[in-house]
Amino acid sequence: MTSSLLLLLKGPLQSWGDQSRYGTRATASTPSKSGIIGMVAAAQGRRRSDPIEDLADLNFAVRIDQSGALLRDYQTAQPWQRDPNGSASLVTRYYLQDAAFVAAIEAPDRGLLESFRDALNNPTYPLFLGRRSCPAPPNLVQGIVDKPAAEALMSLDQWFATMAHKKSRNRTVELPIYRDALPGETGEKRQDVPVSFDSAHRQYNWREVVYAGSKTIDNEHGASTDPFFEAVVSV
């Protein structure tokens, strides 16, 4: 039976880099597969040089509960103790603030997902939402559902948005779900399937992501009834 492990990715800041280059560290608008795989690997105690093919082969899906806002952080760093007159390193980092997602890891073996769950609840290394400055929430693990990833997210009735966000949305809300494309499907290409996390030669393969429908939520706190507004913010 196919099952899925559900993970809540929610916090003040998160960042899922999949196109970072040189002095700019970007973030994707949704969690990356490499970020979630890296979280599981860290929980299990794998080192960056350890194989991860078994994790990368698992199907993955994500539901957008609250898309958040893009935050740009311009940073400088200078080795003032070693070289007070040296040039500063400049980097621009992007984050998602006040975002909430639910990710699903799918596997044909429920026992495998149970081992992931146990590791994530008692991790060997600290867990982060993409970057070390973005710690994972204590309620990261939301349980295991005996359904494929997209169906598991569709069946989840709890909405993890903040109250302020709920009040800004319509009375009926659509939470979009995206999953790994099946063979023969065409979707959006993302280069976030890790081949190696080794800092000496990090490598990532491509995957395709497809829209898998939306979870309809009745929002008792909503004040708006504008369908155009809802269509825009639910993308």
Image (cartoon, helix red, strand yellow):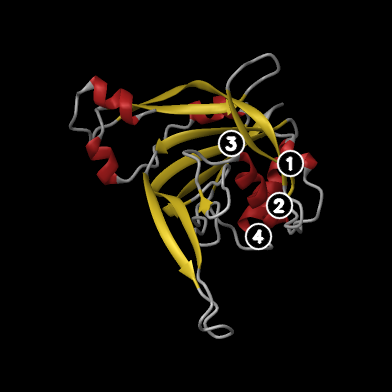
Q: Is residue 122 left or right of residue 30?
A: right
| The N terminus sits in image quarter | top right
Q: Residue 201: image x %, image y %?
A: 76, 52
Q: Residues within 10 Å of mark 3 (few under 14, many from 20)?
A: many
Mark 4 → mark 3, Cα distance in angstroms: 18 Å
For numbered disc 4, what is the local secondary structure?
loop
| Mark closer to the observer (2, 4) | 2
Task: Report the residue marked by disc 2.
Answer: 41
Identify the mark at residue 55; answer none if there is no mark: 1
Q: Is residue 222 above or below residue 36?
A: above
What amino acid is labelled 1 in the image?
Leu
Q: Earlier in the sequence, mark 2 or mark 4?
A: 2
Q: Residue at x 24, y 27 (%)?
A: 171
| Mark closer to the observer (4, 1) | 1
Identify the mark at residue 123; answer none if there is no mark: 4
Q: Nearer the viewer, residue 96 or 191?
A: 191
Q: Earlier in the sequence, mark 3 or mark 2?
A: 2
Task: Report the residue marked by disc 3.
Answer: 104
Q: Are marks 1 and 2 in contact (CB under 8 Å)?
A: yes
For numbered disc 2, what is the local secondary structure?
helix
What amino acid is labelled 4 in the image?
Pro
Q: Residue at x 28, y 45 (%)?
A: 163
Q: Earlier in the sequence, mark 3 or mark 1?
A: 1
Q: Residue 123: image x %, image y %?
A: 65, 60
Q: Earlier in the sequence, mark 4 or mark 3?
A: 3
